[in-house]
Amino acid sequence: MYAETDFLLALIKDEDWLGDAAETVYREHQDELWTSQFTLIELLLVAYREKRDTERVVTNAANLVEVRGDVDTVVSAATYVEDHGFTPFDALHLVESNGDTIVSSDDTYEDVTPRLDLKTVDGE
């Protein structure tokens, strides 16, 4: 069974109106549940929006059910959100760039990775 974001949020949050139902489903179907990296990305966004610990939310979710896809990228991105103040998508871009130069006008990447600043390029 595919575990969607609201199910995992109900398990992770201290108080959630779906919490009891989610716990029942989890107890009865724990071995059948799985999710994708996209659910973890959505959890990253929700945690960021709600000013929660993004790294903890993503890691906890990944420990609850099998995740099919690239878990490490999302967990690494969550760490950059927590430790360096990145937005979720900037953190995902940084991790995916794998040390390659990022072409962007965004100062977020300064002092973290090589960047070609679009603001310094003369257009034709």
Image: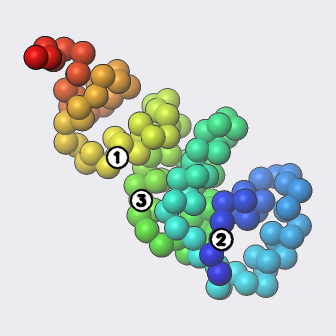
Q: Give the crowd class for mark 2: few <14, some 14-19, many >=20 residues within 10 Å.
A: some
Q: Are marks 3 and 1 in contact (CB under 8 Å)?
A: no
Name the residue rendered at 78%, 59% in the picture.
10
Gap in Å between the C-alphas at discs 1 and 2? 25 Å
Q: With respect to residue 18, does 82 lie above or below?
A: above
Residue named by callout 1: 95
* Residue 114: percent from left, percent from top: 21, 31
Q: With respect to residue 109, does 62 lie above or below?
A: below
Residue named by callout 2: 3
Q: Is residue 109 left or right of residue 91?
A: left
Q: With respect to residue 47, does 70 lie above or below?
A: below
Is disc 3 placed on a helix, strand or loop?
Answer: helix
Q: Earlier in the sequence, mark 3 or mark 2?
A: 2
Gap in Å between the C-alphas at discs 3 and 1? 9 Å
Q: Give the crowd class for mark 1: few <14, some 14-19, many >=20 residues within 10 Å.
A: some
Name the residue rendered at 61%, 39% in the picture.
48
Is disc 1 placed on a helix, strand or loop?
Answer: helix
Q: Are marks 3 and 2 in contact (CB under 8 Å)?
A: no
